[in-house]
Image (tube, rainbow, N blue to C red):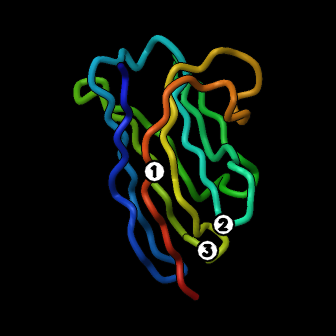
Amino acid sequence: QVQPVESGGGSVQAGGSLRLSCAASGYTYNRSCMGWFRQAPGKEREGVAALCPGISTYYADSVKGRFTISQDNGKNTVYLQMNSLKPDDTAMYYCAAEFTGGRWSDARRFRYWGQGTQVTVSS
């Protein structure tokens, strides 16, 4: 059973930065896209960024220019660097693995999910 594990969440002030990490033992990161999603209370889970084989990257419009998804093959880890954070970025952030096709931002298209890491941005 593949189990992604997120880390790196926390509380920061607006304008600050955080880097989230996702590690999944037993999973080959290059076999399909990896994604980061977030879910705020009362809202649907939304796609934040995805990284696909061939190093194609995709971002939600709301985070373009501020967030960067990257991968360290040697450590089997995917990162989400988040800069210029805003209070609207406050959410539980989830790592997703094993993309099955379709829209990268559709949470139903990923097979494995982590437990999430909380990001809180204060104004």
Q: At which x and y percent is residue 20?
A: 39, 52
Position of the C terminus by quadrant: bottom right
Crowdedness near tag 1: few (<14), some (14–19) or many (≥20) residues, C-alpha within 10 Å: many
Q: Which residue is mark 1?
A: 116
Dot placed on the residue nearer the N-terminal end, 3 or 2 = 2
Disc 3 on helix, strand or loop? Answer: loop
Q: Which residue is mark 3?
A: 86
Callout 1 amino acid: Gly
Disc 1 on helix, strand or loop? Answer: loop
Q: Which residue is mark 2?
A: 41
Crowdedness near tag 2: few (<14), some (14–19) or many (≥20) residues, C-alpha within 10 Å: few
Is residue 58 toward the left or the right of residue 11 in the image?
A: right
Q: At which x and y percent is residue 104?
A: 69, 29
Picture residue at 60% right of the left edge, 52% below the top: 38
Residue at the top extreme, as displayed: 31
Is residue 21 toward the left or the right of residue 86 in the image?
A: left
| Most foreground residue, 11 or 54 | 11
The numbered dot on residue 57 is none
Separation (CA) of disc 3 from disc 2: 16 Å
Q: Quadrant of the rendered structure where residue 85 is?
A: bottom right
Callout 2 amino acid: Pro
Disc 2 on helix, strand or loop? Answer: loop
